[in-house]
Amino acid sequence: MNRRTLLGGFMSLPLALALRPWPVGATSSADIESMQQNWRELLPPDFSPPDANDTLQRSAEEWRRLLSKQAFHVLREEGTERAFTSPLNDEHRAGLFLCAACNLPLFSSAMKYDSGTGWPSFFTHIPAAMGTRTDFKLIWPRTEYHCIRCGGHQGHVFKDGPPPTGERWCNNGVALRFLPSA
């Protein structure tokens, strides 16, 4: 990402955040808990998700062979795709969002909302699917998250999301794969 793209994104972010619509379905902590517990209902009958505890480790060369250049940059080098470039921004079908590297379910379609930021955004996630850590790449601290199974960088979580969580799990679309329900 070049400096002009980064500065343009920062300048347009306040407007995008002010104009974003909030999700309709999640109104209480009980709704969130239900989404987090019942995500398996969205699994197609022919898909068996990997176990989050089944750690997947590959060499950089193996990942290069398996992933596109852009996916490798985001997932393995903690890069960021350009805003408004992911077709997953417009994905509204029922289903699951999986890690593009290892197919671990990370989010359900019920957890997604339009944040107006240009990246697929979610107000919660599937429990035990992600690990977080603080990064200081932009001087101030941010919380980045990774797939717990393969370690692939997904995005950052911010505290400017909709109620009741107040969280925005801002994901790189290229780091995800959408699996529609049956």
Image (cartoon, rainbow, N blue to C red):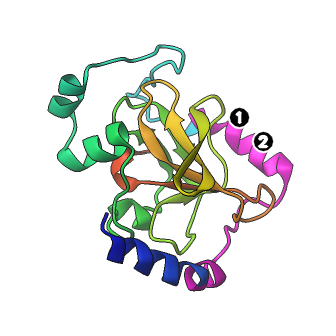
Q: Which residue is mark 2?
A: 33
Q: Position of residue 25 (x, y in %)?
A: 71, 62
Are the two marked residues, 1 and 2, in contact with CB atoms closer than 8 angstroms? yes
Tell me where the magenta segment starts and ends, as one range: 15-40
Q: CA distance from mark 1 to mark 2?
A: 6 Å
Q: Which mark is residue 37?
A: 1
**Is residue 126 in view?**
yes
* Amino acid type, callout 2: Glu
> For numbered disc 1, what is the local secondary structure?
helix
- From the viewer's perspective, is 144 left or right of 48? right
Along the viewing direction, whichever of 65 and 7 lies nearer the viewer: 7
Quadrant location of residue 151? top left
Along the viewing direction, whichever of 167 and 105 lies nearer the viewer: 167
Seen in the picture, residue 109 relative to 161 is either above or below; the reply is above
Seen in the picture, residue 130 relative to 91 is either above or below; the reply is above
Along the viewing direction, whichever of 80 and 164 lies nearer the viewer: 80
Q: Quadrant of the C terminus?
A: top left
Q: Which mark is residue 54?
A: none
Quadrant location of residue 26? bottom right
Instruction: Say whether residue 38 is magenta.
Output: yes
Q: Position of residue 157 (x, y in %)?
A: 61, 52
Seen in the picture, residue 147 relative to 154 is either above or below; the reply is above
* Amino acid type, callout 1: Gln
**Residue found at x 31% / y 63%:** 1
How many C-alpha atoms fall within 10 Å of the one at disc 1: few (<14), some, or many (≥20)?
A: few
Q: Give the prevailing secondary structure in the magenta stretch.
A: helix
